[in-house]
Amino acid sequence: MLKDLVEEELKFQPFLLAGDYTFIGPEEGNAFTEFVKAVDRIAPAKGWFPSIHHSLANREAINKVLSMLPASIPLRIYVISARQSKDHLLHGTIEDYCRINNISLQ
């Protein structure tokens, strides 16, 4: 499943608007919250006031935490827009992102 998500995520990169990014993580719930905390702990700090976005945009940190998750945890691709507050994590699905930004994947 992770391999399929990685391929889908890579194919989606050309559709992202400037500054937006994706990451793979557990579906919503406690696993998602703990995942984000773990990524934030191990991602290298950037600048004087790093934000959660610096951590979640770090592919190495994401992959390291993904490798520690049980195989039974369902995963999905999240899309983060650069036009949000740097202190909040507002995420959505690829489908929502395409609808909001008038992007056609066909």
Image (spheres, grey):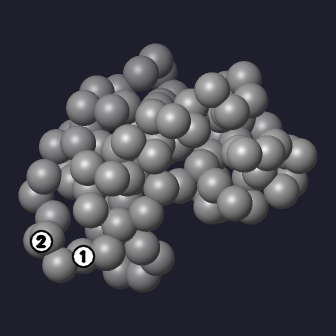
Query: Residue 70 shows which numbered tag?
Result: 2
Question: Measuring 62% from the left and 46% from the top, which residue is drawn there?
Answer: 80
Mark 1 lies on residue: 73
Q: Position of residue 17 (x, y in %)?
A: 74, 29
Quadrant hosting residue 2: bottom left
Give, as a three-letter code, the residue at label 2: Pro
- Return the residue nearer the eye: 91 or 76: 76
Query: Residue 45 shows which numbered tag?
Result: none
**Residue at disc 1, secondary structure:** loop
Question: Measuring 78% from the left and 38% from the top, which residue is drawn there?
Answer: 83
Q: Are marks 2 and 1 in contact (CB under 8 Å)?
A: yes
Quadrant hosting residue 61: top left
Give, as a three-letter code, the residue at label 1: Ile
Q: Position of residue 86 (x, y in %)?
A: 65, 40
Quadrant where the N terminus sits is bottom left
User: Between marks 2 and 1, how big is the CA–CA gap?
Assistant: 6 Å
Question: Measuring 79% from the left and 45% from the top, which residue is drawn there?
Answer: 104
> Few, some or many C-alpha atoms within 10 Å of disc 2 (few <14, some 14-19, many ≥20)?
few
